[in-house]
Image (cartoon, coloured by chain):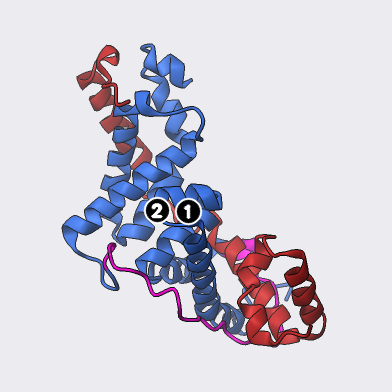
């Protein structure tokens, strides 16, 4: 399809990007923490993908290429707006510390149906957007966009070892924050009539 | 070798990714067999990763798609196909 677009069937670009609209938007929103900025950044990322389509190399996945463009667009906007509250993009991350998980004695699985509830979606959104930027980035690339460790390292310009350390910490931060909230809400609120 | 809970916590992410060395994997699995706290940490982390990766967590704003494609259409009219810049 990309060859066809480049040969002049530009309208096919609409179909090419449709499967990635949600993914690009949610990534921009998680990074920028503002719906209007996220929509604008997502649009700009797609426009840049269109303008630079000839630069796309078939050896990488189109989705991975698009994710990298989105990440760069969001980073650029964050730099311009200086809205990073926790740390600068250029600051060396503190990867030496440890993040302890929330201690639980048992875990009753929260089924995906729980996501039909706005309060659960909000809880998850908030936990992701509250992560410090370096951990949010790696979490989004690896666990949401499902990039490989190597692809994530390349997109972020960091080593594979750093990807692993940051990802571990991001996951532990999310577990620490979300597990007690979800566990507490689940039995008391009786979201599910069969419980 | 017996490992303690804190040691297991450091390996949760690697365990979930199937990235532990065989010896580490065996130690972690042995620990998980008898430690309900570490098992609950592992299960909750896995569950949270499944939930947060679900596309329903971040919904597209109403009209997002229409606005995006209208803007793209405008761009396509502005840039003739032959003049899509060569970036390589």
Residue A49 shown left or right of residue A113 in the figure: left
Q: Nearer the viewer, residue A51 or A111?
A: A51
Residue A110 sits inside the magenta stretch = yes
Residue ID for mark 2: A156
Q: Chain of mark 2?
A: A
Query: Residue at coordinates 39% horizontally, 52% vertically from top-left?
Result: A157
**Which one is in front, A91 or B84?**
A91
Q: In this rendering, is residue A156 above or below A162?
A: above
Residue B24: x, y in percent? Answer: 73, 71
- Within 10 Å of disc 2 (Cα), the crowding (few <14, some 14-19, many 20+) is some
Q: Colour of chain A?
A: blue
* In the rendered image, the vertical position of residue A154 relative to residue A172, given as above or below: above
* Chain B representation colour: red
Residue at (50% x, 34% y) in the render:
A60
- In the image, taking residue A107 as reference, residue B50 lies left or right, namely left
To which quarter of the image does residue A81 belong?
bottom left
Q: What are the residue bounds of the magenta stretch?
A: A88-114
User: Which residue does the numbered mark 1 point to in the structure image?
Assistant: A141
Looking at the image, tell me whether mark 2 or mark 1 is earlier in sequence order.
Answer: 1
Q: Residue at x 77, y 76 (%)?
A: B27
Residue under the image location 45 percent in, 71 percent down: A127
Where, quadrant-wise, is the C terminus of chain B in this rendering? top left
Label 1 Cα neighbours within 10 Å, binned few <14 / some 14-19 / many ≥20 = many
**Image quadrant of residue A135?**
bottom left
Quadrant in which the N terminus of chain B is drawn: bottom right
The reply to whether discs 2 and 1 touch (Cβ–Cβ < 8 Å) is yes
């Amino acid at each position: 399809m990309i060859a066809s677009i480049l040969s002049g069937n530009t309208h096919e670009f609409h179909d090419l990007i449709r499967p990635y609209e949600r993914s690009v938007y949610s990534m921009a929103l998680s990074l920028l923490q503002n719906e209007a900025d996220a929509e604008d950044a997502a649009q700009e990322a797609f426009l840049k993908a269109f303008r630079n389509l000839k630069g796309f190399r078939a050896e990488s996945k189109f989705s991975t290429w698009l994710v990298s463009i989105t990440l760069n667009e969001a980073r650029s906007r964050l730099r311009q707006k200086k809205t990073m509250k926790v740390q600068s993009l250029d600051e060396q991350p503190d990867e030496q510390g440890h993040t302890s998980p929330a201690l639980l004695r048992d875990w009753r699985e929260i089924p995906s149906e729980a996501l039909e509830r706005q309060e659960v979606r909000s809880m998850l959104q908030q936990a992701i957007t509250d992560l410090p930027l370096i951990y949010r980035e790696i979490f989004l690339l690896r666990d949401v966009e499902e990039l490989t460790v190597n692809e994530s390292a390349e997109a972020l310009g960091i080593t594979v070892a750093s990807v692993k350390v940051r990802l571990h910490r991001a996951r532990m931060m999310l577990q620490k924050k979300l597990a007690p909230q979800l566990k507490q809400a689940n039995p008391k609120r009786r979201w599910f009539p069969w419980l | 070798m017996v490992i303690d809970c804190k040691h297991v916590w450091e390996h949760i992410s690697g365990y979930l990714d199937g990235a532990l060395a065989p010896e580490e994997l065996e130690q972690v699995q042995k620990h998980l067999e008898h430690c309900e706290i570490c098992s609950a940490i592992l299960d909750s982390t896995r569950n949270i990763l499944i939930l947060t990766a679900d596309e329903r967590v971040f919904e597209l704003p109403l009209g997002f798609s229409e606005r995006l494609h209208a803007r793209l259409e405008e761009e396509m009219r502005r840039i003739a196909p032959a003049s899509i810049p060569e970036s390589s």
